[in-house]
Amino acid sequence: MPELPEVERVAQTMRPRLVGRKLVSAWTSGKKLRKPTRLSTLGREKPRVETVERVGKHIIASLSDGRMLHIHLGMTGRVVFCKPRDSVEPHTHARIGLDDGSEMRYVDARRFGLITVENTRPADLQELGVDPLSSAFTVEGFARTLSGARRDIKAALMDQTVLAGVGNIYALEALHLAKISPKARADSLSKARVARLHDAVVKVLEKGVKNGGTSFSDYVDADGNRGDNQTTLRVYGREGEPCPVCKTLIKRIVQQGRSSFYCPKCQK
Ligand SMILES: [Zn+2]
């Protein structure tokens, strides 16, 4: 599932192809995505794209008519740029024609994602917590939030109303780097451990962006390129392999229905 670094890369690679372009036509598959796909007015009104921004795991393209194109990649969503005559791959749910003769497509096999035009800023964006790559993410604010979180630290990290954009992979990588067990209680962490975790969250996300994201199966950016970050992961997906720090074998447990990987010796 794409997390902050993958969505950031998709937004970065969409920007040069989309900003300044007019959206001149639209087609949708009619299949049910996470939200109804409403693009039908684009062909009539032909708005221009002014900006493309990542907000948590969402992509928001601001349009010249004040509305916004909202994309969430869900589990398997991809944004593809091509020519209108190029063959349409299975699971294509939207095709938007651009005024330079190219076409942007949204492809999503599992259909947990969305692409739609919103008249106002959608509610699911207003509930998001702080962006961990923004200057608003401070040790003090993070400590305050965690001190009120009566649950394990991994669940708190993955809560989008706490940190916007962190999911399973980067939460586990940050916890290993910070030497904190995914089972530790969020409200029990000392100030020093919170500061270490804050630093680790920023480091693993920045590394993920720099490496082009983590590609295990579906993820590619809007240029069609896979990321390299999967080759650098410390614990994620490495059950039974030696910890990169102490060589203890990495354990896997299940928390909130998702796999957690950690080093039982380094992480307390
Ligand atoms: Zn270890």
Image (cartoon, rainbow, N blue to C red):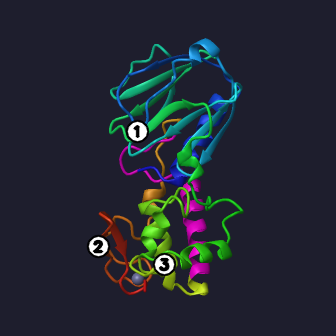
Q: Secondary structure at mark 1?
A: loop
At horizontal 61% and vertical 31% (from top left) the residue drawn is 119
Relative image position of residue 76 (x, y in whole percent):
38, 42
Ligand 1 placement by image quarter: bottom left
* Disc 1 target residue: 34
Q: Secondary structure at mark 3?
A: helix
Q: CA distance from mark 2 to mark 1?
A: 29 Å
- The amino acid at mark 3 is Ala
The boundaries of the magenta stretch are: 194-221
Q: Residue 110: in sight, yes or no?
A: yes
From the viewer's perspective, is residue 255 above or below residue 191?
above
Which of the two residues, 180 or 235, is positioned nearer the viewer here?
180
Q: Is mark 2 in CB contact (under 8 Å) with mark 1?
A: no
- The amino acid at mark 1 is Arg
- The amino acid at mark 2 is Ile
Residue 260 within the segment the image draws in magenta: no
* Disc 3 target residue: 186
* Disc 2 target residue: 253
At horizontal 31% and vertical 65% (from top left) the residue drawn is 259
Mark before the other along the chain sequence, 3 or 1: 1
From the viewer's perspective, is residue 60 above or below residue 23?
below
Left or right relative to 69: residue 236: left
Relative image position of residue 75 (x, y in whole percent):
38, 46
For the image shown, how many numbered marks are present on the structure? Answer: 3
Image quarter in which the C terminus is found: bottom left
